[in-house]
Image: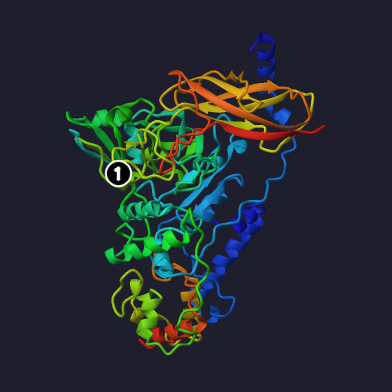
Amino acid sequence: MNRVVAGCVAAAIAAVGLLSIGIAVAPVGAQEAAPSKTLLPGKGADLTMQRCAICHDITHVTRSRLSRDEWEDNIKVMIARGMPIEPHEIPIVVEYLATYYNRDKPPPAAEAPSEQPAGSAAPIAGVLAANGCTACHAAEKRVIGPGFREISAKYRGEGQAAAYLARKVKEGGAGAWGPVPMPPHPQISDNDLARIATWVLQQ
Amino acid sequence: MNNADNAARGSRRDFLGALAGMGASAAVGAALPSAAWGQAAPKPPAQPAGTVSNEAVLAGKDAALKPHSDRPLTASATAEYLGDDVTPTSRHFVRNNLFTPDFDEAKHTVEIAGLVDKPMTLTLAELRARFPEVSTQAMIECAGSGRTGFSPLPRGTPWPASGGMSCSQWTGVRLGDVLRAAGIRSGAVHVAFTGADFGALPTIPKVARSVPVEKAMERHTLLAYGMNGASLPKIHGYPMRLVVPSWAGSASVKWVARIEVLAAPLKGPYMDESYRIPRTPVEPGGRMPADAAMTEGWPVKSIITHPAPNARVSPGKPLLVAGHAWAGEHDISRVELSFDEGRSWRRAELNPAGDKYAWRTFSLAYTPPRAGYTTVLARATDDAGNSQPALAAWNPLGYFWNGWHRIGFVVAA
């Protein structure tokens, strides 16, 4: 760079604010779509949501597309960072993530409604297990979330308690029982939500 | 935080007003649950005790700082908002691992432990009374800064190609002064820093990382309590944090509660499972080699801060092209710019060097020869002769992106 240009640059540095005035910054382009706050429905989605969303928002998953190896490695890292997960649950979560959030292949088409139609007469224990409720809640003692009897004691007798609980199960939330958030469960049918809520309030 | 929230931040008064309204309804709901259980009932507040809400953190930030995730909170501003020589606090990037804790400086202490003759536990006031105050401008950059430059995109916070780095002015005491006062014993190899921040479950391990004794004793490594002339903000580690300049940001532990001198590198998730990088390139999409190295000093890197991407500029007038360059443990020796996709390069002017670990601002007056779309590439070289690569070597955790920064602008006829 020659002296004359260097001098110009020195002046230009001083005038950087001034120069900026003459430059209209184009409007920021449309942002990328925000990552989803719910997981794609599929086998293992509930368990994955529960195990992952305790500590971090689920967008860390929904914006990712990784190979199976990377998901496996990532779960190992998460376990080292305190992820609460039983050994037998690990392959379920990895399989779900590697199926629905895979870099190399698109997720399978949405499955047909399960053989448990809305309002099924399946035993409530099966509904609770199938939807992952019992992964975090037990009858009496606190596991990750409060016990069913604690929930019942807190809300039973309030007007619209069943509707409130059903919505809490569907939408999730945090703060009512401590810092661990309840993940949302958008895939549970309204009828099953009502059954779960009613059953909890009977405990 | 989603993009709807980002949009709302454009009108901060309205946004905060809405939040205040939500808080008030939530409080009513807690007191009178049945009254609030209608269709419009608010969700319960999701703010654990002893923590600062993201809304409160972002209220102290500029709208240019875009959140990338809300739990844990991560946010950065891209290069066109980082033109200041000293990064304003309002635009300093945010990378939490856990919640933003709300500590009281009268109660919070830092413990100096391990291989030292005189272990000690100090409040901020005791620390300040005992050791001389120093101040330095220094780079802090997340190891994953620029991660979205990698293809395929590795896991982790999707830092923009030009976001995740900042260069603020830090005030505190030299960690070396504190360690000398404690008396480092023979056999010391690493010094570990542990943060007091906490997560959703009591079983979640603390954020902890160690660095070699030499880096801990380096005169710019600070136990900091001030940022840009003010008290350290809560989001940046109040009441005290480490500033380990120009190293992977994980070394600059916030809310530091324990400093332990060790005979070996610390073991733990922030040492062994993360912040590792292959010693030689791996096939994109591949796994981390067993002998991967710890991320330490950043490699040479630069960003173009002016003009902004897609700016409209006038033809025939000199345009100031400016930015910053930095090089970890090295000094910058030159920055070159290309306006023809790398066929030819022009050397930019470097501002005088400042503090050892501050970035160097560069600039070049460029008169666009023609109307239309024009691109600029920036390539910095350090005093060891290392130049930025066009694209950084892919690695499984997406660390140390230092590929050429490229922006485009339009010369309007």
Q: Which color scheme does this rendered protein use?
A: rainbow
| Residue in view at x 48 percent, y 87 percent | A119
Does residue B389 appear left or right of residue B306 in this picture? left
Does residue A77 appear left or right of residue B338 in this picture? left
Quadrant position of residue B182: top left
Judged from the image, the secondary structure of the residue bearing numbered disc 1 is helix
Q: Quarter holding the N terminus of chain B?
A: bottom right
Callout 1 environment at 10 Å: few (<14), some (14 to 19), or many (20+)? Answer: some
Does residue A114 appear left or right of residue B214 in this picture? right
Q: Quarter holding the C terminus of chain B?
A: top right
Q: Is residue B228 visible?
A: no
Quadrant position of residue B399: top left
> Of all residues shown, which one is farthest toward the right?
B413
- Camera-nearest residue between A149 and B295: B295
Question: Residue B231 at x, y = what percent?
Answer: 47, 40
**Rendered view: B16 above or below B230:** below
Question: Residue B277 at x, y = what percent?
Answer: 37, 38
| Residue in view at x 31 percent, y 59 percent | B202
> Of all residues shown, which one is farthest toward the top?
A3
Q: Is residue B99 visible?
A: yes
Which residue is labeled 1 in the image? B272
Amino acid at dot 1: Asp
Question: Residue A104 at x, y = what percent?
Answer: 48, 53
Question: Residue B392 at x, y = what percent?
Answer: 48, 34
Total numbered labels? 1
